[in-house]
Amino acid sequence: MILLRHGESHFNVVFSKTRVDPGIVDPGLTDEGIRQAEAAAAALAGRGLRRIMTSPYTRTLHTAEIAAEVLGLPVEVEPLVRERCFFVCDIGSPRSELIDRWGHFDFGELPERWWPEPDETEAELAVRCQAFRDDMAQKEDWRYVLVVSHWGFIRGLTGEAVTNATAVAFQP
């Protein structure tokens, strides 16, 4: 499978300069983040991908939307691949609001309030990463899945700290 970190968000712009949480709830992509997502999706063309799984945050949904348009793939929302809930940006938007914008995505059984309380521990993240690994290892098509996720979740799975719109191959 391919793990793709979302494009640059409004949180990323401020936090990278100040290292202070700017208090932006569920930030969207910047213009640069949109360009990054387009370039990442174009680079993934021809890789034989068959579907996209994405975190329910706005920044990943928008990145997945761009990838879906470029690659012609369906998108399913999977809360297991969400960010480690640590900053204000990791407070999500309610399911009903997300469906208003991305109603063409498969939201499955996502509850109205799906994000955990802030300060998710590293141990809790590790348990979630293991649950994702176990689930994906059972799926016959895992090799053909693009997972649009976040810095913390990708680091939890791979040990790698990736920049915005970076793609990483991963075997569960």
Image (cartoon, grey):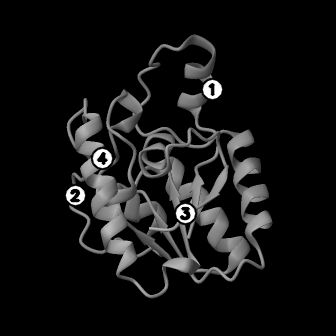
Residue that lies at the very extreme toward the bottom in this rendered image: 140
- Residue type for callout 3: Phe
**Callout 2 touching callout 1 (CB < 8 Å):** no
Q: Quadrant of residue 70?
A: bottom right
- Residue type for callout 1: Val
Density class for disc 2 (Cα within 10 Å; few <14, some 14-19, many ≥20) is few
Precedes in sequence: disc 2 or disc 4: 2
SS for callout 3: loop
Give the mark toward the camera: 2 or 4: 4
Give the mark toward the camera: 1 or 4: 4
Precedes in sequence: disc 1 or disc 4: 1
Residue matched to label 2 = 112
Residue at the location (41% across, 45% down)?
156
Give the mark toward the camera: 2 or 1: 1
Residue matched to label 1 = 13
Q: Which mark is residue 126?
A: 4
Q: In the rendered image of this protein, does residue 85 appear above or below residue 18?
A: below
Residue at the location (70% across, 49% down)?
34
**Residue closest to the eye, 4 or 56:** 4
Residue matched to label 3 = 170
Point out residue 61 in the picture as x, y percentages from the top left corner.
50, 58
Point out residue 77 in the picture as x, y percentages from the top left corner.
40, 67
C-alpha gap between disc 2 and disc 1? 28 Å
Left or right: where does residue 43 sit relative to residue 57? right
Precedes in sequence: disc 2 or disc 1: 1
SS for callout 2: loop
**Residue closest to the eye, 76 or 156:** 156
C-alpha gap between disc 2 and disc 3? 30 Å
Density class for disc 4 (Cα within 10 Å; few <14, some 14-19, many ≥20) is some
Q: How many marks?
A: 4
Precedes in sequence: disc 3 or disc 1: 1
- Residue type for callout 4: Ala
